[in-house]
Image: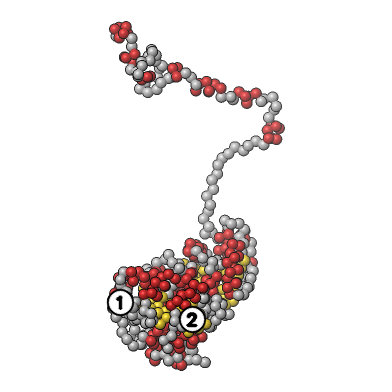
């Protein structure tokens, strides 16, 4: 069996690895480290949780042992799709490079440009960044990538899902042609294959598992669920989630719950907290400081449930996660592999349970086609079976406003015949609006005029030509009347 000591790593790196408690590399590490140390490009394909971060961090530290970084010109570049994954790579670098003098900078969103600029100006050996923030620095003229000797792209398939491929291509064009590229992905979509053919030169392909396979240490199941009605389905689904958690008993020490939409992440976390389950949300709209604090609480077992969007599905190394609950079937089949890969890590066993409603049937079929196996069906816990009781249990639903209007109950025709005699049909005819109609259509000259207290009708005699009805009275007076006056 291969040992880390057999891989020609630097002695300082081996000392740091030994202190972490590892002495045997994983298959992806054993397959990728050797060609990387030889200076070859590497294309690594492995499912999540197999140790890909160390597979490129350890050889990179060894290769950068000699040399010195210059201001604004990093010697190596690591691209990660999310802030959390980039921060995790930085933590791994700190752990494995603590006996070296190599420096690093972490460029991610949600943190100050000013602080990042200070690190870049000093010169860094390893630059770890998300594509968006890296391009921001490049456009501001704060970075030059012409001295990059080793470039790493981690979780490339996730980059594809998040729309970062154009950014990756732009960054590749700014690095020297002679760079060494280490490219890692869990799946090989056609677009990923196109990029590797374009930017990698005769890479050593290391594939330790069939693409898009799931860990055999993970017990998988799916619960087919149908709500009693469309308005009640969300609350009933949350009630089912709580019942599934309860049915796992003490074996569920902690869990990550994945939702497709950020709004659902907040709603599910709030609902769980209302029923006494310690939960916190994490998604891309939250402040980076808040996200970091939430992850640390979950790692330190101060938080039992982490409700997440797919921002937390890739690459997060939280070794002791016992369960993963897919509140929604992922819309991208590849995300299922990465979601459940948060459990069953480092040889441990894990459990992954998914809830599937009727509209998710197509997504479920896509997931099963990708992993090339049928996910076992699981019956809903008896507690959640009566769907009509679920809404009453889930009090986080807002009460619906109802409008009550008082309307006279129409008399049924049959009832009218029984209660109303046949002769008195005449009074109905008496209600004809003829008198009112006569009053409304009085001649103009007989109407009372309002305004200025003149309420009595007046006769101004023949109309004066050119002044209409508004002719002043003194003008309308005859000569004799004015003489009398």
Residue at 44% in and 72% down: 81
Residue 284 spot, x, y in % from top left: 43, 67
Residue at 33% in and 11% down: 477
Secondary-structure class at tag 1: loop
Q: Can you say which quadrant of the picture contains the C terminus?
A: top left
Residue carrying label 2: 44
Q: Are marks 2 and 1 in contact (CB under 8 Å)?
A: no
Disc 2 versus disc 1: distance between alpha carbons? 29 Å
Q: Foreground residue, 171 or 265?
A: 171
Instruction: Answer few, some or many: residues within 10 Å of disc 2's Cα (few below 14, many 20 plus, some between 14 and 19).
Output: many
Q: Foreground residue, 340 or 163?
A: 163
Instruction: Answer few, some or many: residues within 10 Å of disc 1's Cα (few below 14, many 20 plus, some between 14 and 19).
Output: many
Q: Foreground residue, 238 or 354?
A: 354
- Mark closest to the chain's N terminus, 2 or 1: 2
314 sits left or right of 362 in the view: left
Residue carrying label 1: 72
Residue 89 spot, x, y in % from top left: 41, 78
């Amino acid at each position: 069996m291969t040992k880390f000591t057999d891989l020609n790593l630097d002695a300082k790196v081996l000392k740091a690895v030994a202190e972490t408690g590892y002495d045997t590399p994983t298959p992806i590490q054993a397959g990728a480290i050797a060609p990387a140390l030889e200076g070859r490009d590497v294309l690594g394909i492995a499912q999540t949780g197999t140790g890909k971060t160390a597979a490129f961090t350890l050889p990179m530290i060894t290769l950068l042992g000699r040399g010195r970084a210059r201001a604004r010109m990093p010697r190596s570049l690591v691209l990660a799709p999310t802030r959390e994954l980039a921060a995790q790579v930085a933590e791994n670098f700190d752990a494995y490079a603590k006996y070296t003098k190599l420096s690093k900078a972490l460029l991610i969103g949600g943190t100050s440009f000013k602080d990042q600029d200070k690190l870049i100006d000093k010169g860094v050996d390893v630059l770890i960044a998300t594509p968006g923030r890296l391009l921001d620095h490049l456009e501001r003229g704060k970075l030059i990538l012409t001295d990059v000797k080793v470039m790493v792209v981690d979780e490339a398939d996730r980059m594809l899902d998040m729309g970062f491929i154009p950014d990756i291509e732009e960054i590749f064009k700014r690095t020297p042609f002679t760079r060494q590229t280490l490219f890692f992905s869990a799946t090989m979509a056609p677009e990923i294959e196109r990029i590797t053919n374009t930017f990698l030169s005769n890479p050593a392909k290391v594939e330790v598992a069939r693409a898009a396979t799931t860990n055999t240490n993970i017990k998988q199941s799916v619960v087919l669920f149908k709500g009693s009605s469309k308005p009640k389905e969300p609350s009933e689904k949350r009630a089912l989630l709580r019942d599934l958690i309860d049915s796992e008993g003490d074996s569920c020490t902690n869990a990550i719950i994945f939702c497709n939409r950020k709004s659902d992440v907040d709603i599910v976390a709030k609902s769980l907290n209302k029923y006494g389950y310690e939960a916190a949300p994490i998604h891309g709209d939250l402040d980076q400081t808040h996200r970091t604090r939430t992850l640390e609480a979950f790692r330190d077992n101060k938080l039992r449930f982490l409700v997440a969007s797919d921002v937390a599905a890739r690459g997060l190394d939280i070794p002791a996660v016992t369960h993963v609950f897919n509140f929604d079937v992922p819309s991208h089949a590849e995300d299922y592999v990465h979601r459940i890969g948060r459990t069953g890590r480092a040889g441990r066993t894990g459990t992954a349970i998914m809830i599937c409603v009727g509209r998710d049937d197509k997504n479920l079929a896509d997931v099963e086609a990708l992993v090339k196996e049928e996910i076992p069906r699981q019956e809903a816990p008896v507690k959640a079976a009566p769907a009509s009781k679920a809404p009453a249990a889930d009090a986080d639903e807002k009460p619906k406003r109802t409008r009550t209007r008082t309307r006279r109950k129409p008399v049924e025709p049959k009832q009218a015949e029984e209660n109303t005699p046949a002769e008195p049909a005449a009074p109905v005819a008496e209600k004809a609006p003829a008198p009112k109609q006569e009053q409304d259509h009085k001649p103009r000259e007989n109407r009372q005029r309002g305004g200025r207290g003149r309420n009595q009708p007046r006769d101004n005699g023949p109309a004066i030509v050119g002044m209409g009805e508004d002719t002043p009275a003194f003008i309308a007076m005859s000569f004799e009347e004015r003489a009398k006056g």
